[in-house]
Image (cartoon, rainbow, N blue to C red):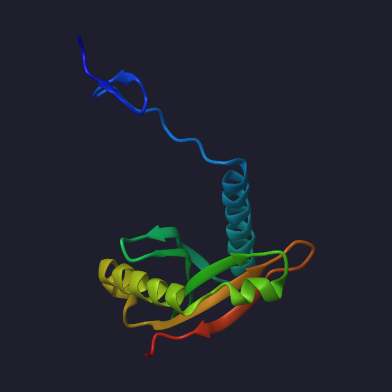
Amino acid sequence: MAETDRATDKPAGAPKPAKTASPERVAAFRTGLSAEARAAALLIAKGYRILAKRFRTPHGEIDLIARKRGLVAFVEVKARASLDDAAYAVTPRQQQRIIDAAQAWLMAHPDHAELELRFDAILVAPRSLPRHLMAAFDASP
């Protein structure tokens, strides 16, 4: 008789079904993608070139990396019910994760390391134009 997994009553070693995300989580993911698209469009309209979207490292994720002339901006996009709520959502812990991820990106793209570096935020809320906060935080301790 084959062994079974007591929790599922399926044969031991059988593949487990993929977890499905809750409707709230799916909606939040879609809202985030939409906000990032709006933020990228804003940056492009301001003359930036998008170098990377959703850059992931073990240290964290950078929503957008953009360049304008001699500047590279690492951009955190926050979508909330209000622009004020979005502004408060960029926590010090998250800032450090973005800084760490930026260092990883710069190691992979050393030709950009000599440019001016800046950490921006773009705040997105319903019925409002996105707000670009240049130099929203810095990498100094």
Taking the view exactly as shown, the residue that stands out farthest to the right is 127
What is the x, y in percent for residue 62? 44, 65
71 vs 126, nearest the viewer: 126
Q: Quadrant of the C terminus?
A: bottom left
Is the residue 118 above or below the residue 29 in the image?
A: below
Q: Quadrant of residue 11?
A: top left
Taking the view exactly as shown, the residue that stands out farthest to the bottom is 141
44 vs 56, nearest the viewer: 56
What is the x, y in percent for residue 99? 38, 76
What is the x, y in percent for residue 136? 54, 82
Q: Quadrant of the N terminus?
A: top left
Seen at 79% across and 63% down, the residue is 127
Seen at 31% across and 26% down, the residue is 6
Is the residue 1 above or below the residue 82 in the image?
A: above
**Number of disc labels:** 0
116 vs 128, nearest the viewer: 128
Seen at 45% across and 86% down, the residue is 138
Viewed as shown, does residue 39 lie left or right of 67?
Answer: right
What is the x, y in percent for residue 42? 64, 67
Taking the view exactly as shown, the residue that stands out farthest to the left is 1
Is the residue 23 above or below the residue 12 in the image?
A: below
Taking the view exactly as shown, the residue that stands out farthest to the front is 6
Seen at 53% across and 77% down, the residue is 120
Viewed as shown, does residue 137 lie left or right of 28?
Answer: left
95 vs 77, nearest the viewer: 95
